[in-house]
Amino acid sequence: MSGFNPLVQGWDTQSAYPTSLFGALPASNAPRPTTTIRDAMTYHITDFRSTILNSTVVNPQGQAQLRVITEARPGRPTIWTDSSRRTVAFVDWGHQPSIEIPGLLPRTPVRDWLRTSTDRKSRFMVLRGVNYFWAPDGPSICLWMPQGTGGAQLLARVGRIQSGAALEMTRMALQYGLLEACVVASTLFLSGVPLD
């Protein structure tokens, strides 16, 4: 095992990805999102301890709902836990970083779970056999569910704010059980860690 860990080796997202959005997708020229999310629930990713990979996810009621924990030692995973300290997801930063979301996603290489499209303008995500995609919108990244012929339903949006990051989720996304997957994908996108 190579002992790869982004906290130990660090990432220079300023110079390494000057034309990308958090190192995950191409940057958009729009200064603000062009889409509107109606009836959204906003989760805040705050309390960063050196990186978003050590943070707290606060629900719309202001309560800590999830914690993201990464030890600064080589080979240590990043773990997402709920308020009962139950593991919700983890990423093993070994030679080929892999992710597991118990009950939702079996152990899978991160680059396969958030697979880059052939034009490199979006990332695909499959959960429970349903296809979704993440695409940039201004300074944010949005989660969409394809519908019909060329249409798509906006489900979530994540972006940086002054106090950390905000993840806006539609009620539909929450009904589909996408909260944990969206939090995990969002923290990975915003971490600046190369996902491919």
Image (cartoon, rainbow, N blue to C red):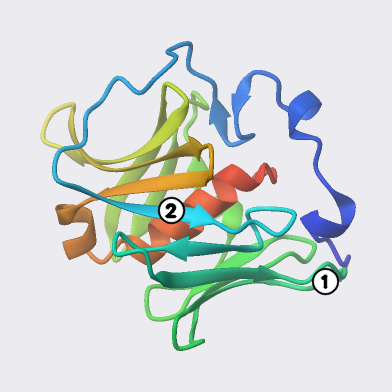
- For residue 194, the mark is none
Measured as percent of width and height from the top left, residue 163 is found at 53, 44
What residue is shown at x 84% (from left), y 48% (from top)?
Answer: 10
Q: Which of 77 and 167 is in front in this view?
A: 167
Measured as percent of width and height from the top left, residue 78 is found at 66, 69
State whether residue 100 is above or below residue 129: below
State whether residue 31 is above or below residue 194: above
Q: Nearer the viewer, residue 129 or 78?
A: 78
State whether residue 67 is above or below residue 182: below
| Residue beneath disc 1 | 75
Residue 43 visible in the picture: yes
**12 left or right, relative to 57:** right
Q: Quadrant of the N terminus?
A: bottom right
| Residue beneath disc 2 | 44
Amino acid type shown at disc 2: His
Measured as percent of width and height from the top left, residue 100 is found at 53, 72
Gap between marks 2 and 1 measured at Cα: 28 Å
**10 left or right, relative to 65:** right
Tell me the SS state at disc 2.
strand
**82 left or right, relative to 145:** right
Q: Which of marks 2 and 1 is in front?
A: 2
Point out the residue furthest to the left here.
Answer: 148
Please tell me how crowded label 2 is: few (under 14), some (14-19), or many (20+) other residues with Cα within 10 Å: many
Q: Which of marks 2 and 1 is nearer the N terminus?
A: 2
What residue is shown at x 42% (from left), y 13% (from top)?
Answer: 30
